Amino acid sequence: MLEVVDLHARVEGKEVLKGVNLSLREGDIVVLTGPNGSGKSTLARAIAGDERVEITKGDVLLDGESILGLTPEERFKKGVFLTFQAPPEFEGIPVGSFLLRISGKGEREALEELKELVEKLGLPKNVLFRELHRGLSGGEKKRLELLQALFLKPRFVILDEIDSGVDIESIEKIVELVKELARDGSGILYITHNPRSLELLGRYRVLRMEEGRIIG
Amino acid sequence: MRVADSPTIKYYTRWELFEEAKKKKGKVEVLGAEKQGEVFSVEGKRVEIRTVEGTGHAHVEGNVKERLFIVEDSTRGPLFVTGRIQGKGEVFHLIRGGNIHYSHWEVKGNLVVRTLLVGREIYLRYDGEGRLRLYGVSLPGRSDVNHHLTAGDIENVHLLVPDDSSFLVHRPLVKLGKGGSAHVETRFLPGGLVVAVPSVEVYTSEVETASHSVKDLSFTGDQLFYLRSRGLTPHEARSLLIEETMKFLLGGLYEEARTILQTVPSLRPTRNPP
Amino acid sequence: MITKGSISRSFVEGLSREKGEPEWMRRLRLQALELFERLSDPLWLKGIDEIDLDELVLYEKVDARATSWDELPPEIRRFYEELNLPEQEKKFLAGLATSYDSEMVYYNAKKFLEEKGVVVLPMEEAVKRYPDLVRRYFGKVFPPAEHRYSALHYALWSGGVFVYVPPGVKVTFPVEAFFLVANEMVAQFEHTLIVVGENAFLHFIEGCSSPQFRKFAFHDGVVEAYVHRGGHLKFTTVQNWSRDLINFNNKRAIVEEGGRVEWVEGSFGSRASYVYPSFILRDGASVDVRAFTIAHGGEWKEGGVKLFHVGKDTRSHVVSKSVSSSDGVSVFRGLLRVNKGATGSRSSMSCDSLLLDEESKAFTYPHNQVEEPTARVSYEATTSFLREDQLFYLRSRGLDEDSAKALIVSGFLSDVISYLPPEYASVFRRVLELDFRGSVG
């Protein structure tokens, strides 16, 4: 289980998280919504260990143990995975070899799987040979992030607005894939303010965030 | 062939050493070429030029059909090589040795040239014309990579890898005329003294593209966090970037040059994850 | 380059005596004269074949502005007419006004400055009234020995402005020296010295977008700025020289610990221009430079910037834009030097040039020397070209060719123009349009 306990945090000196509580089990989906600026992305980054988010109070626990002392790469290895809202572009790092490397999977089986996922997500066929996120449209970047989650199947996946900048037909597909990911065992924190997503995920627990706190 | 005479070049290279060495004579060995008068003519796909004793001088000419591997070695003594290559295909150019090394080539045609410089005092110049992709890496030491290029369609990306006591220079000078296209880039790793002096002269608006840049090879905060959140330590992320950049620049030469690259501390290749 | 005639010691001594200068200034002039005679031309000098020194010294004594409306070249007269400026302004810009009402208009501003102890004076007057203060900085930021023509400047300098802002004082309105000390800005060897005290703030505006008429053909001014710890200087200079003028402009700012400089620089006109503002950054200093250059047919315009990152945690950001049309040549010469020990320094430079037609040219010669391993450096340059389909698109929406070109150029320069004070920006845009209309064809 991944737990956030009374988390307070500052970004560039300004208090953004003012006591957030939430818990996420493997196989579960928790939807987090709220207006822009309410702190949703900051919460996501705090869980993933972004050093630019300064934790001032509270804790983040994985299976009962605090992970605040762990670096981002250590948290990844423990199964915490964040899809970025605005993935940065990389010059000189090809997608395919990068994904093979971080997954630790063998080349032959992994490549097959990756090709399937590329097709499933409607990404350009040559995306595995292109530089990481470079030259991709907003929607394509989101889908490449989702591809990583589907490929790695981490224990906990934080999807930061995976559905923004994506057209309506694709949202149906994305939510379908996310549900599948949960069925396969990943615990999912689905951050969104897209009404269609909220509709499709209506039967799951929905948390609303406002001004750094979870309300209601 | 006129030898470089720009004040900038002479400022960075210990030109007096070249001047002195130029006058001396010695013995040179050129494998994979046939001597015709004063010129060594390359026959096949590989030519090795090395000083046997004293100061070696050689003028080499070759046509590229698919692939050509040029190795210049000044281990046994200073080496002065002038040459001309033309044709179509890929050229690997390995310049190594510990002595004064002057290498000046005319490069013409539709070529991809991948260059690796490893040595103590190297001066390299290409006079290039045509459709060229010039990719290179300068390893720690003192080297001055100087290209005089007329586009055509030219891309020149060069990586400078210094150590504390290095002095590495990249100076691509491009003249762009009608219909031409050029992009030149210097990338560098921190350490030592790196000097990038790209010059791009555009003579008309009837040009396809013209751009140049100088950048250090590093990540933004966002990029670094992204890679760490995918399991890489900062050191691993950096090594990954360097490795991928070198593979991109050196292509097939990367594998050949692995043993050389492993001797450079800042370039220790990454271990695969368990 | 050939120099005709000569400048005698007695001429320089006479100049100094006429101005009633202290001994140290007279000695500085004479030392500079010696340097001028000994030094050879700088390597980057091109486009000037000959200077007549005898002619140079003539204008030192004579008012170089026009004395009657008819004396103005027709294109300048036409320019003012098209700009729709009020009669008074036209006369002033033409240098005809003998007394401009700057006193009235800026009375309140001057009162504020006096109360705060801010000094704004013609340079000659400042040398006499505040000799110790001036001496502390004069010739120390941009030294006479820098190159042959800075030496010439120090031998013959006259006119220019001295501004001193005491520590802690923030001057909240821009000081437009052009109007406050108008007479003093017409000289060809004017020397401007700006000192911003600790934690003080000043926005200084020099120059004017409208074309300036001068009788002399060679301009060799110097601007020195010294920003003390925590000080903040905004310096805006836009100049529009007459077509046959050769412009050397030597500018440098030294920025002390934690100081900040924002520099907006640009020029129209002149036959050949060499303008490379340079900056020395000490610990924690930051410099932001926006510059533009326009080269029409027959012009050779050099712009650039020199940055010396000497201290730790220094930041520099440069946006340089140049436009060439007909067979104009715009040249960018940059120097970025990051010293070993300038830990944590960052520099990013972007240099873009726009070529409007087949004959226009752009040459870029940046020089980057990085010796500090922890420095982060990025320099990018792109050349873009006016395409037929862009022109056609605008014309199919009602603009004529000149207006279309001006609009495209204005869009291209917007990154720099947006840093000009608003009133300047609007005049600038009109000037730009007229400038293009005048040059095309």
Image: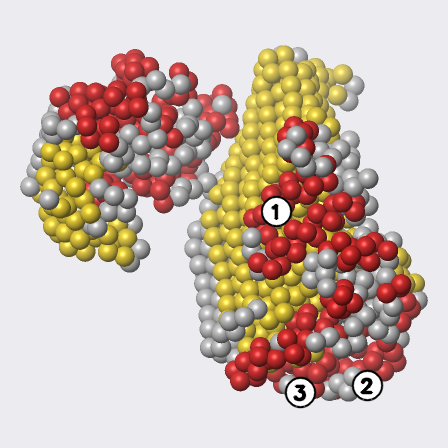
| Mark-to-mark CA distance, 1 and 2 | 46 Å
| Residue B67 position (above or below residue A74) | above
Looking at the rendered structure, the secondary structure element under dot 3 is helix
Q: Are marks 3 and 1 in contact (CB under 8 Å)?
A: no
Crowding at dot 3, Cα within 10 Å, few <14 / some 14-19 / many 20+, comes out as few
| Residue B12 position (above or below residue C249) | above
Residue C337 falls in image quadrant: bottom right
| Tag 1: amino acid | Leu
Point out the tag, 1 or 2, that comes first from the N-terminus.
Answer: 2
Crowding at dot 1, Cα within 10 Å, few <14 / some 14-19 / many 20+, comes out as many
Residue C412 falls in image quadrant: top right
Point out the tag, 2 or 3, that comes first from the N-terminus.
Answer: 2
How far across and down, in percent of the image, does residue A210 sit?
A: 20, 47
The residue lying at 12 percent from left, 30 percent from top is A204
Tag 3 subunit: C
Residue C254 shows in this picture = no
Residue C190 falls in image quadrant: bottom right
Locate the N terminus of chain C and report the quarter of the image it occupies: bottom right
Q: Which residue is mark 2?
A: C17
The residue lying at 14 percent from left, 39 percent from top is A207
| Tag 3: amino acid | Arg
Q: Which residue is mark 1?
A: C413
Q: Nearer the viewer, mark 3 or mark 1?
A: 1
Crowding at dot 2, Cα within 10 Å, few <14 / some 14-19 / many 20+, comes out as few
Q: Which residue is mark 3?
A: C129
Residue C5 shows in this picture = yes
Q: Are marks 1 and 2 in contact (CB under 8 Å)?
A: no
| In this rendering, position of residue A97 left or right of residue C234 | left
Looking at the rendered structure, the secondary structure element under dot 1 is loop
Q: Nearer the viewer, residue B22 or A172?
A: A172
